[in-house]
Image (tube, rainbow, N blue to C red):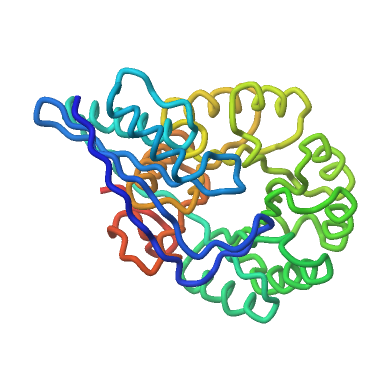
Amino acid sequence: MLVALETRKLRLRHPLVTAHGSTTHRKIIEITAAEDGFQGHGEAAPLPGFGLETFSESLTALQNWVKNPNRLPDAPAARSAAATAIENLEKARSSSAPTSGKIAVQALVGSSESSSIESEVSHALNQGHLAIKVKVAATDTKTDIARIQSAIKLVGSEAALRLDANGGWSLEDALYVLSAIDSDDVDLVEEPTANPFDWKKVSEETGVKIGADEQLTDESQVHQLIKYGAAQTFVLKPSVIGGPPATRKVAELARTNDIDILISSFLDGPIALRSARDLAMELAPNEIHGLGTASLFIDKFPADVVPNNGFLRCP
């Protein structure tokens, strides 16, 4: 198997502000694995602050993998990219029919400004999204409450409202903010605090369901989250977890323990988005997934990974 690497930079239309800071662009590494006239593609897009290696570490790991493609890289983003390329190569070799159908995807509101929440949420609703995720915990709790309450009024019964704190609240702040809203108005909150042992208390005291995301980094951590009943939903990022095979394994563990799953983008490029879309179709076709991120970029993405009326369509 021959492997080629190429680096790219993707630019966001507006800074995405989270508890980890502000992101203006994504540096990605695209992989092409070729054998017997067939090709498979993968992509690594590590993002500092989210438990992954740096871009340079990922690139080095993949350069070493090129020399010895029989052993997947240990670095998480690099491993995910390599595993995706290998699976796509096998799909090309088998000439299997491509995935078909469509999945619903949520819109992402990432600005920290209260003044912009109305325009961003209204735009998402006009685009046909059935769920909207609002980033929180990047400012103060009063601003968070104001932004959430504005989003609740705008969304009404038209869409599900989800929150993502990226572990940025303290336990006290999480309880304060979530107690200020009606739990029926929020579908779930992802990672309210950095300590997953807080989450059960947050859910029990506020009535808001919890989604695990960044904490789903390896199998031992997954088992810990299950053991402590920390979350009702696992938000699976294939580009973080280890690619399609690892994602399927975690999804099966979740199902066995009555935990819902969503498939989510890591502000990925087109290759990783396409792979995640296909996994969403395979593992949870009736959920609303976190894969509506292509429109956040200035760079033009292929039409099959750009939301159309709130859906991604598989050709």
Residue closest to the eye, 88 or 21: 21
Residue 267 x, y percent position in the rendering? 47, 54
Quadrant housing residue 141: bottom right
Q: Residue at x 51, y 46 (%)?
A: 264
Q: Is residue 256 left or right of residue 78?
A: right
Relative to 111, does residue 92 appear above or below in the rendering? above
Relative to 100, does residue 61 appear above or below in the rendering? above
Quadrant showing the N terminus: top left
Q: Residue at x 62, y 78 (%)?
A: 116
Quadrant housing residue 297: bottom left
Q: Is residue 37 left or right of residue 159?
A: left
Q: Is residue 132 left or right of residue 223?
A: left
Residue 195 x, y percent position in the rendering? 78, 39
Q: Residue at x 77, y 46 (%)?
A: 193
Q: Is residue 145 left or right of residue 298?
A: right
Residue 268 x, y percent position in the rendering? 43, 51
Residue closest to the eye, 165 or 131: 165
Residue 237 x, y percent position in the rendering? 51, 40
Quadrant housing residue 285: top left
Q: Residue at x 18, y 35 (%)?
A: 39
Relative to 30, does residue 226 appear above or below in the rendering? above
